[in-house]
Amino acid sequence: ALTFDDGPHPVYTKKLLDGLRKRGVKATFFLIGENVEKDENEKIVKRMYEEGHLIGNHTYTHCNLSKLETGEAKKELEQTDTVIEKITGKQPVFVRAPYGELPVDSEQDLNRIYIGWTVDPLDWMTEDTGAVVKTVVEEINPGDVILLHDCYKSSVEAALRIVDLLKAEGFEFVTVDKLILE
């Protein structure tokens, strides 16, 4: 499963969606609520949804949920749920906690499924397309969840190259919900 955090980005997410559509690939996007409300990003989210990508919650302000009191963490998630539901008509079930830090009460939250990752090329740190591609292609195994960020040009370029290389090796890309159910 190819997953993207921190979007949508007004330029790079569109390019990513174009490339994924061209390749017939569906991905999972964990969106930051305040980013959804910027610029023309609501249109991008609508397009994601209409093209069959899975949309998940990545909090409203990209905060560390483990450092917030229960009420504040819940508010961060609910605010983003509302923003996404207003566009798609569906409340997101899947959540990726920023920094992988779960809220204190995550086990009691039966309405959400928290999603981690198994392959992290640290694309946000390097912003080096070739290094990101190399790390993912060398580390990947069937059933893995790849963590990337659609707010960097280098990550979008890397993602599309990764798709091309791994499809050539026989890998199939699915959304996180399909990966979990299979």
Image (tube, rainbow, N blue to C red):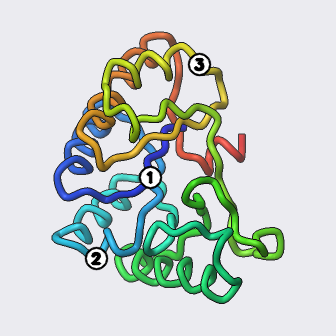
- Classify residue 71 as left or right of residue 50: right
- Classify residue 77 as left or right of residue 163: right
Say which of 133 and 160 sits in front: 133
Query: Any mark on residue 37, and which?
Result: 2
Residue indicated by mark 1: 5
Dots 1, 3 in contact, CB < 8 A: no
Q: Amino acid at mark 2?
A: Glu
Dots 2, 1 in contact, CB < 8 A: no
Residue indicated by mark 3: 139
Circle 1 sits in a helix, a strand or a loop, which is it? strand
Name the image quarter holding residue 163: top left
Q: Residues within 10 Å of mark 1 (few under 14, many from 20)?
A: many
- Classify residue 17 as left or right of residue 99: left
Circle 3 sits in a helix, a strand or a loop, which is it? helix
- Quarter of the N terminus within the rendering: top right
Residue 69 against residue 155 in the figure, above or below: below
Residue 121, position as x, y percentages in the image: 49, 30
Q: Residues within 10 Å of mark 3 (few under 14, many from 20)?
A: few
